Structures are given as C-alpha cells and as structure tokens.
Image: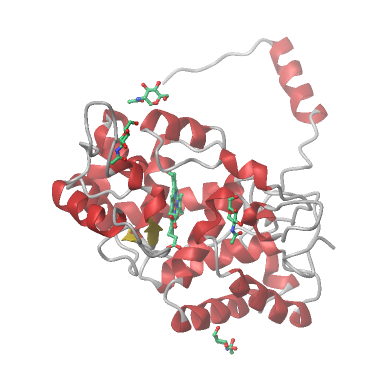
Amino acid sequence: MSTVTLAPSAFATLFLLFTVIPLSTTAVLDAYYYDQRCPQADKIILETVRNASMHDPKVPARILRMFFHDCFVRGCDASVLLDSTPGNKAEKDGPPNISLRSFYVIDDAKAKLEPACPQTVSCADIIAIAARDVVVLTGGPYWNVLKGRKDGRVSKAAETTNLPAPSLNVTQLIRSFAKRGLGTKDLVALSGGHTLGFSHCSSFEARLRNFSSTNDVDPSLNDVLAENLRKKCLKPNRDANAGEFLDSTSSIFDNDYFIQLVAGMGVFESDQSLFSDYRTRWIVESFARDEGLFFREFTTSMLKLGNVGALEDGEVRLNCRVPN
Ligand code: HEM
Ligand SMILES: *[C@@H]1O[C@H](CO)[C@@H](O)[C@H](O)[C@H]1NC(C)=O
Ligand SMILES: *[C@@H]1O[C@H](CO)[C@@H](O)[C@H](O)[C@H]1NC(C)=O
Ligand SMILES: *[C@@H]1O[C@H](CO)[C@@H](O)[C@H](O)[C@H]1NC(C)=O
Ligand SMILES: *[C@@H]1O[C@H](CO)[C@@H](O)[C@H](O)[C@H]1NC(C)=O
C-alpha cells in the first residue's frame, strides 16, 4: 500500500478546490429521506408497481430499463418521463424508444403520492424506488434506495444517442460507463438487468446476416440460437413485435443471463462481447457460478447508477410528464 504525502501548499490547494468549487448541483442522497417527509412513499410505490406487474408481466422489465435510460441521459432526473411539446422532441420519442413504455405506472404512483404528500416525492425518486421494487418482485435482491433527487426541466430526443448501442464492443461499453463514473464491474453487473425482458429484432438483426466481410452470421453467436433468431427475424412480413427474450427465464431476476453468455447465447453483441474479452470474462464467469455474488454486486452497482447526475437544484414535479 502506498502513502501519498502532500506538501503544505498542496493541502492549501486541495482545501481551496473543495471549498471554492460549487458542489450544489449534485444532491447528497439519503436512504431515510422520506421517513419524516412522506412515510407512506415506499408503500404507495410498491403497491402501484405490484398491481401493474400483476396485470401486465412486461412492466418489471420496462421499469428497470426506464431507470437505466433516465440515469444515462442527463443523470437520474426523470428527464425520460417528460413528454414532447410542439417545440421540443423529448427523450422518450428519441430513437431507442421502441420498448420504453409503461410510463403510466409512474403516473399512477405520482397520482397517489400527491394527495398523500403534496409536492414532496420527486419523479426521479419514484423511478429509482420502482426499479428496486421490480427487481424484488421478480425474485432479485432488495436494497435500500438512496433518495432526495430533484427533477430536471429538460429532455431532448437528440441526447439519447449517448446511450450505448447493442452493437458496441467491450472497449466502447467500458468507455460509455466510465463517462458516468461507472467501472468495468458495474458494466457487467448492470448488464445483468438483461435477465429480464425482451428485444425487438431490429436491435440484433445485424448479427444474423451480412455481419461482416468474412462472416455472414456473427461468429460469437451460438449456432442454435442464430438459427432460431433468423427464423423469427429474417422473414418477409415479420410482425412489428417480432423479437426474442433476453434470457431463457425472462420474467425471473436470476443469474441465467450470465450462464447464457458462457454458452454464447447473448442476444446483443454488447452482451456477448462481455464474454469475449479478458477484462470482463472473469466477472461474467464469477456471476454465472455464484448468483449471490451477482445479486450483491448488482445492488452495489444500482446504487452507483442511481447517483449519476442526481440533481439538487431541481424541482419536485406535480405531474411527471411536464415541468412545473
Ligand atoms: C450495457 C449497455 C446496454 C445496452 C447496449 C442495452 C441495450 C438494450 C436494447 C437494445 C434493448 C432492447 C430494446 C428493444 O429492441 O426492444 C434493451 C432492453 C432492456 N434493457 Fe438494456 N442495454 C444496456 C444496459 C442495460 C442496463 C444497465 C439495464 C438495467 C440495469 C438494462 C435493462 C434492460 C431491460 C430490462 C430490457 C428489456 C426491456 C423490455 O422488455 O421492455 N439494460 N437493452
Ligand atoms: C391495478 O392495475 C390495473 C391495470 O393497470 C388498473 O386498472 C387498476 O386501477 C389498478 N388498481 C389499483 C388499486 O391501483
Ligand atoms: C420512436 O423514435 C422514432 C425515431 O426517432 C420515431 O420515428 C417514432 O415516432 C418514435 N416512436 C414513439 C412511440 O415515440
Ligand atoms: C471495438 O471498437 C473500436 C471502435 O470501433 C475498435 O477500435 C476496437 O478495435 C474494437 N474491438 C475491441 C476488442 O475493443
Ligand atoms: C449483403 O450485402 C451486400 C453488399 O452490401 C448486398 O448486396 C446484399 O444484398 C446483402 N445481402 C443480404 C441478404 O442482405
């Protein structure tokens, strides 16, 4: 272990740095934030999410993905929830909108929270709590969500191009996560979110034909899965909803996603690339072997994801679709 010794002048510089740079835009989050302000908040959100998930089993995956998108574009500020206006196309109407749905669940929770605790619970916190709830409801780990985010006032469709694409390789994925202060372990653990849900053909069909000058089909894709996906996606009049589940147990939060990667059964190039590269392969293997380890690391990484760009200088929206 190495020790860094600082000259007195270095101390002075550090002191100046920490006192002069305004840190006010980043909220310090707190697990007990609503304990006094709105003790019913957790229960109201859980009941809403549970009821919605019972009526529509697609809800858990959609809420989990919504949290990821929110945090990766402008930080976790509920920008993903704002509706487009005549003068502005919002994130939710940007290119990867194809499975960003079920916003009504957040609206329902907000509609119950406002009469209970007026203008207290931010939409950004509702998404973060709901994302934890859907993980628990589908069999995954529980964690204490940190709260106290404020809602932003800006949402731009053009900014969704900052989201990682399913065609990225490990180097590009690592860079995309590093921009948000997330490390390689966070990348692998959070990609485990693909233990839930579904993808449309458009997100992975480039792997199925004309993949590269040397391979018609992506060579990292398992042959049996490739044949299956080709049958579903490469037909003339395919249904707009055609696609594949991201994991063989797509409504259960478990470590099957990682077991599938080891077998070459990852649906996206981005998924499968985690097993092709030495920097991430050992982490995939350790999660495939040990579900408890995956659950612990997923929890830690979700807390980190929830801190990305958490706003202090924002507002608590009355309606999650429009700024106050
Ligand atoms: C590592 C980079 C990631 C990429 C490239 C990526 C890409 C995608 C794509 C392309 C889809 C399918 C969209 C469609 O065709 O319908 C998808 C679905 C999904 N993603 Fe990711 N994702 C990433 C990370 C994450 C993270 C960190 C989470 C959450 C922790 C997550 C959760 C989900 C879920 C739950 C679905 C299924 C949605 C549904 O069934 O409606 N993803 N992702
Ligand atoms: C439960 O969910 C259904 C379907 O979304 C909805 O119509 C109903 O109002 C919800 N009930 C409660 C108590 O939230
Ligand atoms: C999704 O994005 C595409 C491309 O930007 C756009 O044409 C389409 O209208 C959007 N769809 C929805 C439901 O927002
Ligand atoms: C990943 O993509 C980048 C940019 O396209 C490329 O330079 C790199 O060689 C690729 N491969 C790996 C394994 O990172
Ligand atoms: C593959 O790519 C070539 C050249 O870009 C194109 O001529 C051909 O039609 C493509 N084949 C398929 C099956 O899309």
Residue located 26% across and 38% down the image = 275
> Which quadrant holds residue 235?
bottom left
In the picture as drawn, the residue positioned furthest to the left comes out as: 224
Q: Give the vertical position of 207 relative to 316 (above or below).
A: above
- Depth check, front residue: 151 or 206: 206
Q: Give the vertical position of 171 relative to 43 (above or below).
A: above
Question: Image quadrant for the N terminus?
Answer: top left
Whether residue 74 appears in this view of the structure is no
Q: Quadrant of ligand 3?
A: bottom right
Whether residue 263 appears in this view of the structure is yes
Number of callouts in the render? 0
Residue located 54% across and 60% down the image = 100
Residue located 81% across and 52% down the image = 87
Q: Position of residue 214 (x, y in %)?
A: 22, 26
In-image side of 97 versus 28 (left or right) = left
Q: Position of residue 86 (x, y in %)?
A: 80, 57
Q: Position of residue 153 (x, y in %)?
A: 79, 53
Q: Give the vertical position of 46 relative to 225 (above or below).
A: below
Q: Position of residue 18 (x, y in %)?
A: 75, 29
- Depth check, front residue: 136 or 52: 52
> Which quadrant holds residue 282?
top left
Residue located 50% across and 37% down the image = 177
Question: Image quadrant for the C terminus?
Answer: bottom right
Rendered image coloring scheme = secondary structure
Q: Give the vertical position of 174 relative to 118 (above or below).
A: above
- Depth check, front residue: 307 or 158: 158
In the picture as drawn, the residue positioned furthest to the right comes out as: 324
